[in-house]
Amino acid sequence: MFKRLLRQVGIEITVSRYPAFESFYYYLKLLDVDVILDVGANEGQFAEELRCQGYNGRIISFEPLPDAFAILNTKALKDPKWDCYNLAIGDSNATAELQVSRNTVFSSLLAPSKEAAEVGYDVDVVSQVPVSVNTLDHLWPSLACDGRKVLLKIDTQGSEPAVLRGASGSLPFINGIRLELPLRTMYNDQLAIEHYLPLLRTFGMHLVELVKVCRSPNTGELLEMDGLFVRSTQQE
């Protein structure tokens, strides 16, 4: 009732589904970000939350899963500053098999580990889908990001290092990176959290924020964090 009355006088109240976005949005404004590369977009949940928080810059989303991309594309068509590509981003320009999980947000180019089932992750693979993979370096000239303040968000369920390897030429032009950091490895060959700080440091980035992503429904233990890294202002 109260929200409806406020709406009648031109005041709209929105409540974030993800409270951690409030501090993330603070950094977007601090860095003056005007382009976000949304790698691993699924159905566009991340981009929708950005808009909910008030971000009005460009969003470029990448999602390889055809069904999820169809939903993503329908949403993006309504937003003139939101483009999307039916692609996976990795370290080569090729075709790969995407392991499609029962819960599609856990779909990955990597196979799920035994630990994933033990802690209650809904990662049962129900099918495999061939998808196109491109490097960010290959796509960069067509993205029109030169001279812009760019943030790279990576949510690729274990293949984040491949995204970074395929962006070695683009990363000097990127101001910040947000990516998932696993405390337990949920996919085969996935890097654990302790490997990411030195890895991101090689790209001139340092950690400024950690927020909880999820806990195990079986044990209650923390499984993943989101880390926000920004470009260092001086040589370390």
Image (cartoon, grey):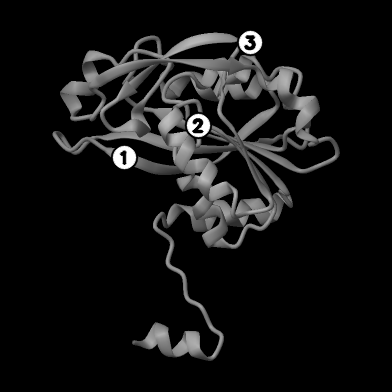
Left or right: residue 101 compared with residue 165: left
**Which residue carries the number 1 mark?**
214
Of the residues under marks 3 and 1, which one precedes in the sequence?
A: 3
Mark 1 vs mark 2: give the one in front: 2
Q: Disc 1 on helix, strand or loop? A: strand
Q: Which mark is residue 93?
A: 3
Residue 200: percent from left, percent from top? 61, 24
Q: Is residue 51 visible?
A: yes
Q: Position of residue 113 (x, y in %)?
A: 27, 14
Of all residues, the one furthest to the right in this rendering is 147
Bin the neighbour count of mark 1 within 10 Å (Cα to Cα): few under 14, some 14-19, many 20 and up: some
Say which quarter of the image contains residue 170.
top right
* CA separation in Å, label 3 and label 1: 32 Å
- Identify the residue at horizontal 58%, vertical 47% (top origin): 76
Q: What amino acid is found at the position of numbered circle 1 in the picture?
A: Cys
Q: Callout 3: helix, strand or loop? A: loop
Label 2: which secondary element: loop
Residue position for label 2 = 40
